[in-house]
Image: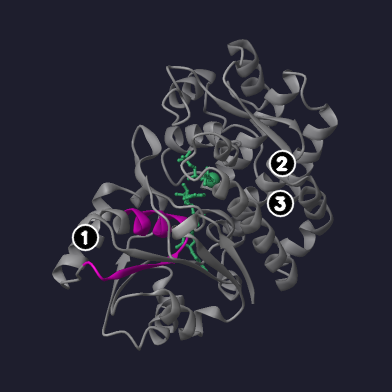
Amino acid sequence: MHSLTVDLGDRSYPILIGPGLLGNSTHFTNAIRGRQVLVVTNETIAPLYLEKLLASLQDFDKVDSVQLPDGEAFKTLDTLNRIFDTLLEKRHDRSTTIVALGGGVVGDMSGFAAACYQRGVDFVQVPTTLLSQVDSSVGGKTGVNHALGKNMIGAFYQPRLVLIDIDTLTTLPDRELSAGIAEVIKYGMICDAPFFAWLEANMDALLARDPAALAYAVERSCADKAAVVAQDERESGRRAILNFGHTFGHAIEAVQGYGKWLHGEAVAAGMAMAAELSRLRGWISQQEVDRLRALLTRANLPQQSPVDMAVDDYLRAMSVDKKVQDGKLRLVLLRAIGDAQIVADTPKEQLIEALHSCGAR
Ligand SMILES: NC(=O)c1ccc[n+]([C@@H]2O[C@H](COP(=O)([O-])OP(=O)(O)OC[C@H]3O[C@@H](n4cnc5c(N)ncnc54)[C@H](O)[C@@H]3O)[C@@H](O)[C@H]2O)c1
Ligand SMILES: O=C(O)C(=O)C[C@@H](O)[C@H](O)[C@H](O)COP(=O)(O)O
Ligand SMILES: [Zn+2]
């Protein structure tokens, strides 16, 4: 088992990574302070992993579970209410711990429910997709979508433990594996050039689900993310680099309708757009853009806009991005592979040219 820490003072917590962790009760008994637990999962994950998790929670006095409908389209305030309904109907008090068993959708909603229920209860992340293991379970961004924008309603709320059982990746559909790889590639692009080179050398092993390659990619991604989050927990500055490709990607998700494009797919296309913009600005070379594009292609990820999206669709959706300040769009661009910078002065013509170069109408 590999262990790292997200260093946030008295809110620091461990990330445990390895095979077989779901069946080990010790990690839960060590991290959970009270005697009550609510497991939040969904209809797809429950038949695969709920029984195993419940067996590891046998020592607690009161363990309930709730199964949410599956899909990004259900990452809403309405679905959140199902968690609150269960907590109240089953009479969970303030000492309860919410355990999120699932991908980023379950994790983001469970974390937000934990932040809100009786003004805050403990929370543990058990991520089961590659994307949630390398990204969403770490760092405490929680929330739900709004029709007008991604993750628009939420809170920063840190878990007490992130338990990553990489065995769960064996059942993940190929398309979801690729979506997770998009966020892995992101770390290489924004802050870890040696990792980017490692991904170029090991993409075939990752796609073949080689356990050692997957474990390494999860560990390295979590380490990269934990370092950024420890510097700037609430995104007042540097943390925004984790949003590389997301201003474009979130526009794709919202305009297409949540769930049509997977988050990781939208981020992949968004990273290609941000890379093109960085090149137009004279910061990275065509060769660096080509390296990103080649890696996205090998990972079976898109790098072009949906055909039916026009530049105006992007500009409208991007104008509500959470990084907008005083009406000014802030974007994450690249100085080089492995070196991201946040900029507020992108010329509109360059932005439009970058969008066109990725197929936006
Ligand atoms: N909080 C953050 O920092 C952060 C970071 C990145 C992404 N996100 C959010 O995460 C969400 C995307 O997460 P995701 O990619 O995990 O999607 P997801 O949660 O929708 O899961 C993808 C699909 O895989 C299924 N699934 C989950 N685990 C499985 C397993 N082991 N075997 C088989 N099927 C399994 C799910 O039921 C779902 O159908 C988005 O809402 C995105 O905004 C949040
Ligand atoms: O943890 C972060 O910070 C991120 O930006 C990680 C992203 O991968 C993630 O998709 C996040 O939810 C986007 O944040 P948002 O603030 O733009 O909604
Ligand atoms: Zn993301």
- Kindly identify which residue carries mark 2: 189
- The residue positioned 28% from the left and 80% from the top of the image is 35
For the residues carrying marks 2 and 3, which lies nearer the camera in this image? 2
Q: Is mark 3 on a helix, strand or loop?
A: loop
Q: Does any atom of ligand 2 lie closer than 8 Å to the CB of label 2?
A: no
Residue 1 placement (x, y as % from top left): 64, 77
Three-letter amino acid code at the position of disc 3: Ala
Q: For the C terminus, give its image quadrant.
A: top right
Three-letter amino acid code at the position of disc 2: Met
Residue 159 occupies quadrant? bottom left
* 192 relative to 66 in the view: left or right: right
| Contact (Cβ within 8 Å) of mark 1 with mark 2 | no
Three-letter amino acid code at the position of disc 1: Phe
Marks 1 and 2 sit apart, C-alpha to C-alpha, by 39 Å
Residue 7 placement (x, y as % from top left): 55, 57
Q: Is residue 256 above or below residue 262?
A: above
- The residue positioned 55% from the left and 36% from the top of the image is 240
Tell me the magenta residue range: 94-112
- Kindly identify which residue carries mark 1: 84
